Image: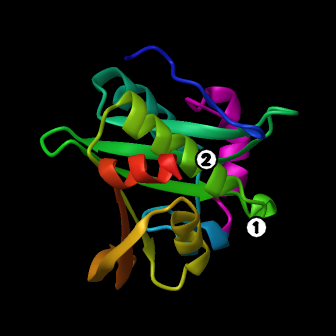
């Protein structure tokens, strides 16, 4: 499965980020509010950071350990953010992470992209469990997970170090059985 993967919904196309996306990646990922709401987005965000992310996407696809997608609008191919799923092959699970450029917040794009990645993870990758975390204080990200049927598992206290500060996160999950039950309803 190291062919390029393209996932589509009514409004979005998810595909591997490209060099042509670098200006938009730097512009949107470089916003202070994006860095503040993600666990490992650097600020300031430079062209080198975008190149690293694009290389990580290509390598992850090649070894099937990490599937990273640029999120684009169907109607004009506008790049608006990124989403990915890191695979733990030993335990047959994945972890979703995403970010959306500030001009595109509160439009349901993260929810729509997450739904596509959950579907990809369960239906194509045949994963047993997919989880995601969000920094405490980023309630919008928690709403994305809840809208996709994910279930809160708990709080991971001081789980990530961001700058000089230890940050706690809330973790949500969806197992294969839970996903199948959601599809039936």
Q: Looking at the figure, which quarter contains the N terminus?
A: top left
Residue 112, percent from left and from top: 65, 50
Question: Is residue 75 shown above or below 104?
Answer: above
Point out the residue furthest to the right here: 75
How far apart marks 2 and 1 lie (CA) works out to: 13 Å
Question: Which of disc 1 and disc 2 is earlier in sequence?
Answer: 1
Residue indicated by mark 2: 113
Q: Is residue 108 above or below residue 114?
A: below
Does any portion of residue 82 appear in the rendered image?
no
Q: Residue furthest top?
A: 3
Of 164 and 71, nearer the camera is: 71
Which residues are drawn in magenta? 13-31
Circle 2/circle 1 CB separation < 8 Å = no
Seen at 41% across and 32% down, the residue is: 123
Magenta stretch containing residue 15, yes or no? yes
Q: Quadrant of residue 64?
A: top left
């Amino acid at each position: 499965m190291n062919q390029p993967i393209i996932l589509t919904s009514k409004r979005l196309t998810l595909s591997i980020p490209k060099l042509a996306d670098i200006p938009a990646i730097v512009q949107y990922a470089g916003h202070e509010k994006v860095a503040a709401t993600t666990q490992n987005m650097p600020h300031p965000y430079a062209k080198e950071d975008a190149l690293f992310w694009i290389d990580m996407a290509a390598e992850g696809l090649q070894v099937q350990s990490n599937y990273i997608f640029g999120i684009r609008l169907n109607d004009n191919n506008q790049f608006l953010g990124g989403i990915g799923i890191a695979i733990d092959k030993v335990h047959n699970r994945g972890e979703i992470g995403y970010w959306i450029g500030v001009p595109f917040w509160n439009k349901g794009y993260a929810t729509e992209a997450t739904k596509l990645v959950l579907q990809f993870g369960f239906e194509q990758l045949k994963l047993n469990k997919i989880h995601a975390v969000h920094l405490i204080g980023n309630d919008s990200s928690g709403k994305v997970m809840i809208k996709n049927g994910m279930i809160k598992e708990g709080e991971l206290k001081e789980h990530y170090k961001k700058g000089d500060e230890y940050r706690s996160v809330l973790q949500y999950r969806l197992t294969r059985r839970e996903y199948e039950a959601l599809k039936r309803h």
